Image (spheres, coloured by chain):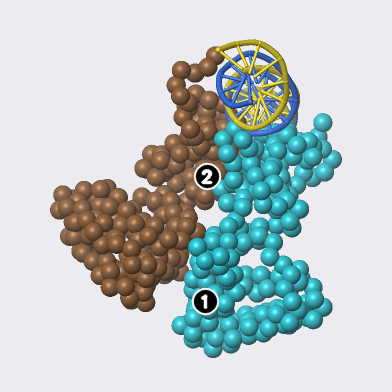
Chain colours: A cyan, B brown, C yellow, D blue
Amino acid sequence: MSLAQPLSRASLSQQIRDRLLSRIMTGALKPGDRLIELKIASEMATSQAPVREALRELEAMGVIETLRNKGARVRVITDEELRQIYDVRAQLEGYASELAALSGTAIKARLTALIRDMKKAARKGDSAAFADYNMEFHRVIVENSGNQVLLGMWETLNVKMRTMVNVARSSRNLQELAESHEPIVDAIVSGDGARAHAVARTHVLDNKPVAASQV
Amino acid sequence: MSLAQPLSRASLSQQIRDRLLSRIMTGALKPGDRLIELKIASEMATSQAPVREALRELEAMGVIETLRNKGARVRVITDEELRQIYDVRAQLEGYASELAALSGTAIKARLTALIRDMKKAARKGDSAAFADYNMEFHRVIVENSGNQVLLGMWETLNVKMRTMVNVARSSRNLQELAESHEPIVDAIVSGDGARAHAVARTHVLDNKPVAASQV
DNA sequence: GAGTCAAATATTATCGATAATCGGTCAATG
DNA sequence: CATTGACCGATTATCGATAATATTTGACTC
């Protein structure tokens, strides 16, 4: 009866959660799509119970929403909410950059390498790779803040953001966008906490999407 | 077969989650205490499945932690983590106060009333009531920021904080603590965003617990 | 008496089946 | 012809039972 495999470390419900999450983040599942428990269960060759547990976790993460007796669907993030996410992110990353500047940890090499990677991806017009490097850049800063709580909050926001598939910019924009990260590195390396805070905050706000319509 | 009651709106697993959460926040369940699924199920006259779902939600909220095949226990928040929570809260509330100041919404009456309530509780030495009013004060500000995302993050931090039962101060401290909220109201009412930001941030940091030991 | 293995126990993880609920269909009714 | 309401298919919500895993206990060896 025992399975031959060493049996992966994560529990079944965690595996299901991760698989669903990646489907959402890659866009295979789009906002509004329904998540039907028994369908997912049979797809993943398991039963309904662990699927439900996975859905509850995703719900708590804010990635899906469930209505009583009506099931779960991928959460639709409104333009307004996305803008609010950018506002909060700006605060968090500003603070993270401040801490990173003050801590004096050497992350210059890492960050400049990521900017280089971004530029390379921009030249190739590979916007998916660009997005990955871009996110990694920001994550490195937040990780190096040394504040685990801050990192956790940032990740939550990040996951929510990623459910909005905002790809496809012109490659000229990408080139400029890559360059716009350089002042952040300078400020962090300089050790000037207040400046690092301001520069990082402004950077995020500069990329905040404009309001779709004036309500 | 149908139940006579209108059947409460929340699903069973949500009811269980809330009941467990309040037990944790009131201190009936302390950090480190185990949560045994079948025991909870029989206590609440239900079966194991919805309990498991509730536990998964609590885990995603960061209130409990589970080890594979070993079950769940109330999460132990270290001194260091609590201090990090205060740091992040200071940022979030600073930003919330800034927004509240700029929005010009009239919350002065509400906030001053809460300060009055705090002082009254302080005189009576009722630290539990004091804590409630205190939290309410801060919540009102964050709610009035108009940023739902910000409110969500603040609530998450708040729940985590509350799992640490930090009661019992001297009543003199409470009196001073109540008064220390007045400059925040002044700054918000004045409409000076930058000042409101700074004052609120400082207020939170002033109450940040000191490091237990110098590592 | 200390160490070690194995049965016994406690608990989690998963399954399959059943009950409850929702949304739509469609015929009977006024 | 609009309305009601009983049925039906799809799906969620819950249960009870079983399998898998960890922990403890206790006898046995040296």
The percent coordinates of residue A109 (x first, y second) are 67, 83
Q: Which residue is mark 1?
A: A201
Q: Which residue is mark 2?
A: B58
Q: Secondary structure at mark 2?
A: helix
* Towards the viewer: A111 or B140: B140
Q: Residue at x 76, y 71 (%)?
A: A127
The percent coordinates of residue B9 (x first, y second) are 48, 32
Which quarter of the rendered picture does the N terminus of chain B lie within?
top right
Q: Secondary structure at mark 1?
A: helix
Q: Quadrant of residue A124?
A: bottom right
In the image, is B177 to the left or to the right of A54? Answer: left
Which quarter of the rendered picture does the C terminus of chain B lie within?
bottom left
Q: Quadrant of residue B180?
A: bottom left
Q: Are marks 2 and 1 in contact (CB under 8 Å)?
A: no
Q: Residue at x 46, y 83 (%)?
A: A194
Q: Residue at x 52, y 44 (%)?
A: B58
Q: Alpha-carbon distance for marks 2 and 1? A: 32 Å
Work out which residue is located at the far left of the displayed protein and give it. Answer: B123
Q: Can residue A158 be spotted in the picture?
A: yes
* Towards the viewer: A42 or B169: A42
Discs 2 and 1 share one subunit: no
- Vertically, is A149 above or below B54? below
Q: Quadrant of residue C9?
A: top right
- What type is the residue that disc 1 sits on? Arg
- Vertically, is A97 above or below A187? above
- Vertically, is B203 above or below B57? below
Q: Which mark is residue B145?
A: none
Q: Residue at x 48, y 45 (%)?
A: B74
Q: Can residue A100 be spotted in the picture?
A: no
The percent coordinates of residue A134 (x first, y second) are 68, 73
Q: Badge 2: few (under 14), some or many (20 or more) residues near its Cα, within 10 Å?
A: many
